[in-house]
Amino acid sequence: MKTSFLGLAALLLAAAPAVAAPAPKELTYTVSMDPAAGPHQFRVRLETPKLGKEQAVYQFAATAPGTYQVMDMGRYVRQFAAFDANGKPLGSKQISPNQWELAQPTKTREIRYTIAETWATPVPEHNIYRMCGSSLEPDHALVNGQTVLGYPQGWQAKPLRLKLNYPSAWTVGTVLVPDADGYFHAKSYDQAVDSPILLGNLTNAKTKVGNADVALYCYSATGLVQATPLLADMQKMLGAAQAFLGGDLPVKRYAFLYLFSDKVAGAWEHSYSSEYILREGALTPEFAQNVVDIAAHEFFHIVTPLNIHSEIIEHFNFVKPTGSQHLWLYEGVTEWASHMMQLRGGLVPLDDYLSVLHNEERYDRTRSDTTYSLSKLGLNSFSDEGQRQYGNIYQRGALTASALDLRLLELSHGTRGLRDVLLQLAKKYGPDSPISEQNFFRDFTALTYPEIGDFFRRYVQGAEPLPLKEYFGRIGIRYDAVLHTGHQLATLGAPVAFQVRGDDVYFRQVSPALQAAGVAAGDQLTAIDGAFVDRRNYAGMLDKISARPAGADLALSTSRAGAPAKDVRVKLTAAEDIQRYHFAPDPAATPDQLAARATWLKNL
């Protein structure tokens, strides 16, 4: 691919060609990016087949699959213009936040506009998660399809091709494969959105996992993280995923896209790839394990929702955000699988997995509305109310999947757990045949046992407390809601409380010790001892503080009101160790309980 940069005026008001070019068969997009041009903007040119009157509106995305947030990409559009086959300007006007009306759609053959990147463009509300957005910097760029591309109304399912113009020294990371002319092809707008692109000064590495070719592309601002050693750290997780999924993967190609800089923004799943915006750091074992834990979750999305999803995902509504009551399946079950496949693959010990369960239950009981059902959360996920509960889809959602797995193993006498049912569902439905949004609970029950219908009614559609003591007791694991130990341990003081918004973690209450260090309620916690923090790992990292001596200093990084993170040192205080939501192996477990635990640990 070549570098081809046009001035903004030339792009929008180019002279008409001497001979009109024939209309392309596909929607043909050219996205040009010149980081040296000044503004953080992408220049887009769309050549269209002949439009009908039904395509009188050009649509930008109001949201995108897997974001569960309002995006309203029309807010970022600049200098929108339409042209006929000879390059003559035609009229157009904005008629809604995400729609432009073409004055003469049947004559329109070309649309040109610039669209600002989302990272550096302030908006008054509904900020877009960084990993779901776009960025254009001197040495790299992130392109998510919905952040640069729109489509003529009614043509969401029409095939398209995409050419990128960018600095010639850059490497392109994506699961898409260019043709001989440098075009990336997608069967629909949905697939284009489902195929993020990372460009720039990247390193890359490849491996084979079962029947799938897996690639990893990595941008690291100062070069601390390189693709080859990072992929080596991920190999055991990929092997565990392969075993968990029965040997082969339900995809033939997969790409991990990593952007390491001074920002922590989390990760975003796609059907055949995933992208990560993480704070750069030395690739220590602890740093690598945090990366692997996040990757395990995103990678398992090749099962849900790629191969198990409802018609709401199959025919995604980019115009109006629409929630699904099965968000628990897409995110909660995926979070469960990401940890369970590592436990069953021997990558983490049982005690570490029980700590994950503790963190999930603690989050549900202390940081969320316990009367808010998982189904309701999914249906309301795009609303401000739903967003306040959203983090619990990963916590109670995963814990509910753990309980569902145990219930299935009990009913099948140890022969069939949640993993087995998921593989059966993936084989039955696959990427092109959706489950029923309304009837899935019934269909799942018919595929398993009548008692599972009661489980769904009580713990997914309803919000009854999970019977953790009963279920885990069957495999010789004790659950205690409150456990007094009499021991002293180091803490950040009291009161301390946190709030999760998106993937970020904020202080809701701060102790005198934190106040003395300059931390205030509302500050974002970005790192502990130099290791990045997000919603997935913060609880476990905070738990490890207790092993330190009281009076010692702890290094934290915090950010206030979006400002750059700053380092602070907090003096730890002593407090009695009263453990809540405690999971531990029962030393008095019976032979039958131990046998059931062994089955649970090796349900492969």
Image (cartoon, rainbow, N blue to C red):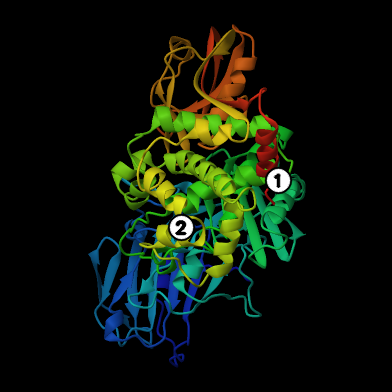
Dividing the picture into quadrants, the one containing residue 424 is: bottom right
Tell me what residue is drawn at x 35 percent, y 65 percent: 317
Tell me what residue is drawn at x 41 percent, y 60 percent: 442
Q: Is residue 499 visible?
A: no
Q: Earlier in the sequence, mark 2 or mark 1?
A: 2
- How many labels, in total? 2
- Which residue is label 2 attached to? 445
Q: Position of residue 41 (x, y in %)?
A: 44, 58
Dividing the picture into quadrants, the one containing residue 541 is: top right
Q: Position of residue 568 (x, y in %)?
A: 54, 19
Q: Nearer the viewer, residue 158 or 81?
A: 158
SS under mark 1: loop
Is 300 on the left or on the right of 111, as rendered? right
Q: Nearer the viewer, residue 432 or 186?
A: 432
SS under mark 2: helix
- Which residue is label 1 attached to? 602
The answer to whether residue 566 is above or below residue 304 is above
Q: Position of residue 483 (x, y in %)?
A: 52, 16
Is 258 on the left or on the right of 69, as rendered? right
Quarter of the image with the N terminus in it: bottom right
Q: Amino acid at mark 1?
A: Lys
Q: Is residue 392 visible?
A: yes
Q: Position of residue 500 (x, y in %)?
A: 43, 34
Q: What is the crowding at mark 2: few (fewer than 14 residues within 10 Å), some, or many (at least 20)?
A: some
Q: Nearer the viewer, residue 387 or 308?
A: 308
Q: CA distance from mark 2 to mark 1?
A: 24 Å
Q: Amino acid at mark 2?
A: Thr
